[in-house]
Image (tube, rainbow, N blue to C red):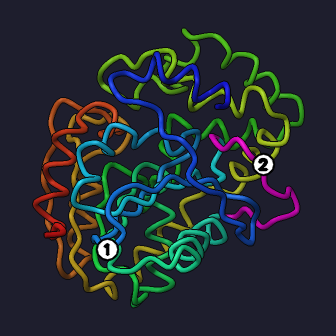
Amino acid sequence: MNAITANAHTQSGGAAALPTSGTFASSLGPVEYHVAGPESAPVLFFVHGLFTNMQLWRKLVPELSQHYRLAIPTLPFGGHRIPVDQQSDLSPPALAALIFELIDGLKLNDVTIIANDTGGALTQIALAEQSDHPAVARLILTNCDAFEVFPPAVFVYLRWIARLPVLPTLLAWQMRLDFVRRLPLALGWLTKHRVPAGVLDFYTDPFVKNRAVRRNTTKILRDIRPKYTQAAARELHRFTKPVLFAWAPEDRLFPRSLAERLHAIFPDSRIVDIPDSGCFIAEDQPQALAAEVRKFVPQAV
């Protein structure tokens, strides 16, 4: 058991840490993933955002694994433990393409993609490119980047930090301090309720402790900009399968208006509000999110 997982078992905020079920050899590099649930059940494929990993979804596993097949990767978005080749294309379109590469490579069908934060933006980019992907049956977007919000204004400074060689290392040293991680400029506004320090360790330890992961992350941050999400928005009308926006209207980073604008684009979509939550609904309100998933996605008999 790795140090991050071992620490998490005692500080995971009410849910056991997810173990790694396997490692997929993607075109960008190794991608760890966790799988759970019946093999023949409809698939839920989870896409986290920057500075998080598969542990973001850990509270949903006991809620959903009885009736669904869960595929939960740790994508190379800054919370990954295994660095990818720094020479790889880590632009938003390349990272978005990784979503379908994993779905295809893991031979998943009848897939509902559930995406959050930066992962929601990358899912939009992926669907704009392949709106008719045969494995994807449905989409659930929780609070995430869209249109001109990529990244949210409070995090634009990260793009500039990533351009100066010394500053990412300085940021990593600061992220060792719990009070720094809880600032609005860090992880403080991503949840409404206080997250245990051990959970924050899930997300920040790879960036803080692994120089190669830090180099991956800074390369990603340099290229995050609204031109990608704005271009994707012009194509999303071509995705005609059911879409659910499970949105926290109290989120300070991604207002409900983003969900409303996306809702107006997708031909078959609806919005449900999940109150008392920040952006990380899977942390703040996992049971409420799981209930909406069960209503939206047919269950295995």
Q: Quadrant of residue 99?
A: bottom right
Pick the residue in front: 116 or 14: 14
Q: Secondary structure at mark 1?
A: loop
Label 2 crowd (10 A; few <14 / some 14-19 / many >=20): many
| Residue at mark 1 to residue at mark 2: CA–CA distance | 32 Å
The reply to whether the magenta stretch includes residue 104 is no
Pick the residue in front: 24 or 46: 24
x, y percentage for residue 199? 48, 24
Q: Residue at x 15, y 65 (%)?
A: 296
Vertical position of residue 12 compared to residue 282: above or below: above
Vertical position of residue 159 compared to residue 161: above or below: below
- Range drawn in magenta: 79-91
Q: Secondary structure at mark 2?
A: loop
Q: Residue at x 50, y 45 (%)?
A: 54
Q: Amino acid at mark 2?
A: Pro
Vertical position of residue 149 compared to residue 28: above or below: above
- Left or right of 96 in this view: 10: left
Q: Residue at x 50, y 72 (%)?
A: 125
Q: Quadrant of residue 141?
A: bottom left
Q: Which residue is mark 2?
A: 83
Pick the residue in front: 37 or 269: 37
Q: Tag on residue 120?
A: none
x, y percentage for residue 145? 43, 54
Chief secondary structure of the magenta span?
A: loop
Q: Amino acid at mark 1?
A: Ser
x, y percentage for residue 143? 33, 48
Pick the residue in front: 9 or 74: 9
Q: Which residue is mark 1?
A: 40
Q: Quadrant of the C terminus?
A: bottom left
Q: Select label 1 or label 2 by which is in front.
A: 1
Considering only order in the chain, which callout, 2 or 1, is on the residue closer to the N terminus? 1
